[in-house]
Image (spheres, grey):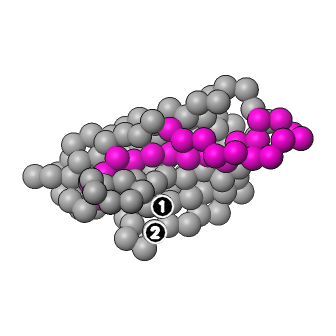
Amino acid sequence: VQLQASGGGLVQPGGSLRLSCAASGRFFSANDMGWYRQAPGKQRELVAIVTVGGSTTYADSVKGRFTISRSNAENTIYLQMNSLKPEDTAVYFCKAQIRRQFNLPRNDYWGQGTQVTVSS
């Protein structure tokens, strides 16, 4: 199982970016999927989570600016980031709870991270 994240880059304050993360490989199901971020010198923190049913949870710092969505058919999640601020600068990681076979427990899988830099 692999998670491939993409879409990061350099953007000016107030700008937008869209991140994508696709889960590939052989597995039975992907349950909760989400985005986390880690700024230099800080711990990794939750940004947003989306369940297989489409329920979402956001960090207070991104509510109203970021939107997480998913395509269950493609095992892909997206993070639309609007009104970006310098404090959003971080490496963004995606995570998925994957059940590799129906009779096995779920495990967490992480993507490789994509850099988002918000600067003028």
State the mark number for residue 46: 1
| Residue 19 on image: x %, y % | 42, 43
Does residue 98 lie above or below 84 as drawn? above
The residue lying toward the viewer, choosing from 87 and 120, is: 87
Residue denoted by label 2: 59
Magenta range: 88-111
User: Can residue 70 be seen here?
Assistant: no
x, y percent for residue 50 = 60, 57
Q: Is residue 119 left or right of residue 72?
A: left
Looking at the image, residue 75 sits to the left or right of residue 94; the answer is right
Query: Extreme left residue here?
Result: 120
Tell me the residue at 43%/73% (across/down).
60
Mark in the foreground, 2 or 1: 1
Quarter containing the N terminus: top right
Can you see residue 110?
A: yes
Q: Residue at x 66, y 53 (%)?
A: 32
Is 97 part of what is drawn in magenta?
yes
Callout 2, which amino acid? Ala
Q: Position of residue 66 (x, y in %)?
A: 41, 60
Decide: few, some or many residues near mark 2? Use Cα within 10 Å; few <14, some 14-19, many ≥20: few
Above or below residue 105? Residue 75 is above
* Contact flag, marks 2 and 1 (Cβ < 8 Å): yes
Q: Label 2 vs label 1: CA separation?
A: 6 Å
Q: Secondary structure at mark 2?
A: loop
Q: Earlier in the sequence, mark 2 or mark 1?
A: 1
